[in-house]
Amino acid sequence: MLRWRVAFTRWDPLQDLIALHERMNRLAGTDGPGWMPPVDVYETPDRYVITAEVSGLAREHIDIQVQDGRLLLTGERPSRASANERFDRVERGHGRFARAFVLPETVDVADITADLRDGVLEIRVPKRSDRRQIEVE
């Protein structure tokens, strides 16, 4: 299974080395067929947002889980291969995919939401607010 790790926190050279190893395995074909949806990750004052281009996928073909401090995005784009069709060109990826994103400790995992609209999946990861007002007596 392919895993890509994107950290919201400080740069970790070991994670980059692991990601490079996974890319090399993918190029060498040792991880099997699949594709990788492109993603954007950005931060607002109150949340992190992950957007992924997953055109052609229905909601039931996408799975989002949080495990061990990582958000896991997995899914599958079914192949349209048929005995009656012969493709002259195939550029869109088909098959299974998996992406992993390291979550900082300051997020509220219970309130993560996702929306699929026009082939773009948007995952909103709210930040946990540890601030509280203390009244001086």
Image: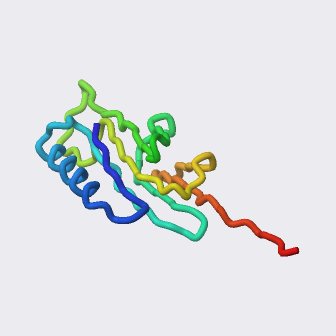
Quadrant containing the N terminus in the rendered view? top left
Residue at 30%, 36% in the rendered image: 95
Observer-nearest residue: 98 or 61? 98
Which residue, as the protein is rendered here, is positioned at the far left? 28
Horizontal side, residue 92 vs residue 75: left or right: left
Observer-nearest residue: 126 or 12? 12
Q: Residue 62 placed where, x, y %?
A: 46, 39
Which residue, as the protein is rendered here, is positioned at the far bottom? 136
Residue at 40%, 53% in the rendered image: 53
Relative to 45, does residue 2 appear above or below in the rendering?
Answer: above
**Residue 17, image quadrant:** bottom left
Observer-nearest residue: 118 or 43? 43
Observer-nearest residue: 112 or 39? 112
Residue at 49%, 34% in the rendered image: 60
Q: Residue 40 placed where, x, y %?
A: 41, 61
Which residue, as the protein is rendered here, is positioned at the far front? 137
Report the label total.
0
Q: Residue 110 placed where, x, y %?
A: 62, 46
Q: Residue 15 placed where, x, y %?
A: 28, 55
Chosen colour scheme = rainbow
Quadrant containing the C terminus in the rendered view? bottom right
Residue at 60%, 66% in the rendered image: 46
Horizontal side, residue 108 vs residue 97: left or right: right
Which residue, as the protein is rendered here, is positioned at the far top? 83
Relative to 49, does residue 133 appear above or below in the rendering?
Answer: below
**Residue 96, image quadrant:** top left
